[in-house]
Image: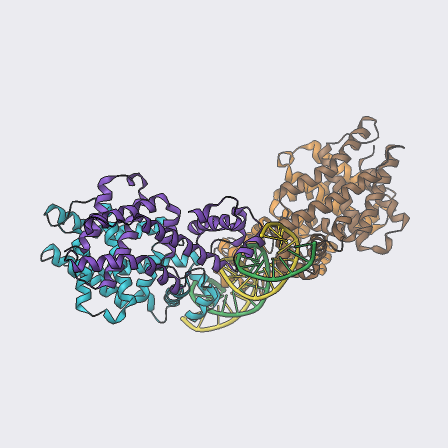
Chain colours: A orange, B brown, C purple, D cyan, E yellow, F green
DNA sequence: AATGAATGAGTCTTCATTCAT
DNA sequence: CATGAATGAAGACTCATTCAT
């Protein structure tokens, strides 16, 4: 958040404008000129901060991903049952998405897109999912979670998270609805629980 | 399949070439000239059959979606427990994806992209998910499935399906692995089962 | 008129449609496909009757010009003073324009345009103005008209006619107004009269 | 002249090249690439200065019209009889046309063409003819000019001016011929004089 | 004679990127 | 660092014309 919103920082303004425009019009649908305009800088300035439009996208991707990862790490809870800790994490992740709809939408769109090089996507995934992988392994050893192939479970976690945030972004009025929130966790948890 | 591959049908050849190229290079990354060339027709021919590049994409989207829907409908089973029927359907859908990797990848990329107008995406979803909705409602009434909000469950089904096919497409060698296949269904089913 | 309106004659329908469309959108702004469509024929049919789009325009130009010339010739009066005969001719020409607004507008637009080869324009002018030239010469010899250079007077006649018809086409409600009609002739006649 | 010919001003060079090429090949017959080439700039530069080819034409039209209007205003004479002042104005206008044949030819072609939106044409006409309208009204009140409908007289003035300049442009050798010049004014003046 | 699918050269316009100021 | 005019390659789309039926 900090990185994308420093008001006087032109670099930050450019990233922020790009996030917004890429979401609305896609990567190729957004011209560097329009990003510069939205950021309130000259067209040339963009290229002082980023060597190319693609580099801008990649930087943006990594920046947003890092913010998400930091956010998750900050809310990681070390006490309680695995289910309680997972619930806290799930709710925290959902809340982050609700508080940062632009960034979440950005993920929805670019997580599977060709515009982001495969290596970058994988790298980003592993950074975040490594975290989850440890928790799943722990749950399997303690007999709380099914002993299914880990890669499949990770992909499933990711897919369910995307689905849940998609649902809440499409129905913002349910963002604070305890029933739906709990239901989303229930689906997530029961998929893997024994 | 039939629709996209009639050898002598220029329209079909164009759709087929577009499917392939859009997958590899994205919508904006693919020029109409390259589509025409890959299809073995003149550039003007593309515009004789489709009023614009966007219309071509939309036609392609609807065509592929229809093929998938037809495919699912053809394998719908009417007998057995709900779980058995769901498993048949799930395996059938996974197999369709494995047999049509191009079309599945196309879905992965364009199901959430801005390139496809929202109305079209929703229309496509409803066509397919309406089917699933009925099964879920039935399961809830017979006490087999959790009574969670339906729209959330549908989005979850969709998300899990995308995740599973993503996994199998990324690991083609596991496409016929019974364990992984069953595991993917297990995750899917337990998410919703009581 | 006959030539442009034979209902069942595809050639005539094409000319008629072209006249209308060229007026509204210009020569280059009108596609042969749109002409064919408006004429109710296939695109290929146009090229059975005219070797090219340019040839169609030229044929149209000559046809319309011929109609106008025939119309003038038909109303030429041989008796009375030169002024009376000129007035009859002027009124007749104005009326022709009012009765054939499409054709008149066509003249306004293409009489000075590059689209019509110079040779064709000159040929058309001479066909019609030759007629007028004789009358002017007669008037000069009988001392009724100024002895100014003939080419200048002819160009002036043409210019005044275009101006008058432009005025009446822009103000159709005055088409039958005797005062304005007489005024237009007065301007025309006094320019040249002694 | 100044506006269209500043050597170092790329915008001016583009306008100047466009004037020349539109005259020779028409609006649709002239490609933006050829304009840029003739102006010695890159194709993109044209669109940096004008949003579209049409906007370029309109700017050109208004610019040339303004030059003509300024030129007329600069030579307006306030003393002498109405006829003398009209003669000065007429000769001045004719001379302007002879000195700026490109611009005059541009008017001949685009003053009645569909390429220029009607509103623009009318606006341009009124700017120039408002001037003339005042003089005609004055002449009518002082009993020098016929009391014919003003709009008709204005259109007639315009038509005669176009005809006269057409004549002189087609016969450049007569541009300095006093007899023809006086003759052209005589036709113009007698049309309206009592 | 009539059709309309097919052609491909040509058009306008966009846009990432550079560079002199 | 910042600017924005300039660049020119590339793209979507048009359209006069042909030709097999």
In the picture, measured across the screen, residue A155 lies left or right of residue D180, that is right
User: Where residue C34 appears, x then y in whole percent?
Assistant: 52, 50
**Of D186 and D109, the residue lying toward us:** D186
Q: Quadrant of residue D40?
A: bottom left
Q: Is residue B106 visible?
A: yes
Residue C185 screen position, x and y as percent: 22, 48
Residue A4, image x, y percentages:
57, 53
Q: Within the image, what quadrant is residue B8 found in?
A: bottom right
The residue nearer to you, when weighing F8 against E2, is E2
| B18 sits left or right of D85 in the view | right
| Quadrant of the rendering where the C terminus of chain B is positioned | top right
Q: Is residue D123 toward the left or the right of residue D72 in the image?
A: right
Vertical side of A89 occupied by A29: above or below: below
Give the number of callouts.
Answer: 0
Q: Residue furthest front?
A: C79
Image position, residue D107 (x, y; %): 32, 59
Q: Say which residue appears at 11% left-offset and 50% top-offset.
A: D144
Q: Is residue A194 visible?
A: no
Q: Residue at x 17, y 67 (%)?
A: D179
The residue shown at (42%, 56%) is D54
At x 27%, y 57%, the residue is C132
């Amino acid at each position: 958040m900090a990185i994308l919103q420093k008001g006087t920082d032109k670099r930050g303004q450019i990233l922020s404008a790009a996030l917004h425009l890429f979401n609305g019009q896609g990567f190729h649908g957004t011209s560097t000129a329009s990003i510069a305009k939205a950021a309130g800088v000259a067209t040339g300035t963009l290229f002082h901060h980023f060597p190319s439009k693609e580099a801008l996208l990649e930087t943006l991707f990594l920046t947003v991903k890092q913010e998400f990862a930091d956010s998750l790490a900050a809310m990681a809870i070390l006490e309680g049952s695995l289910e309680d800790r997972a619930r806290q994490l799930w709710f925290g992740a959902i809340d982050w998405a609700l508080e940062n709809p632009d960034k979440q939408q950005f993920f929805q769109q670019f997580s599977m897109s060709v515009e982001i090089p495969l290596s970058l996507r994988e790298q980003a995934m592993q950074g975040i999912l490594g975290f989850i992988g440890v928790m799943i392994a722990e749950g399997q050893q303690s007999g709380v979670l099914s002993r299914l192939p880990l890669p499949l479970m990770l992909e499933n976690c990711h897919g369910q998270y995307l689905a849940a945030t998609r649902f809440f972004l499409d129905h913002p009025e349910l963002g604070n609805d305890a029933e739906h929130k709990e239901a989303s966790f229930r689906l997530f948890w029961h998929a893997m629980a024994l």
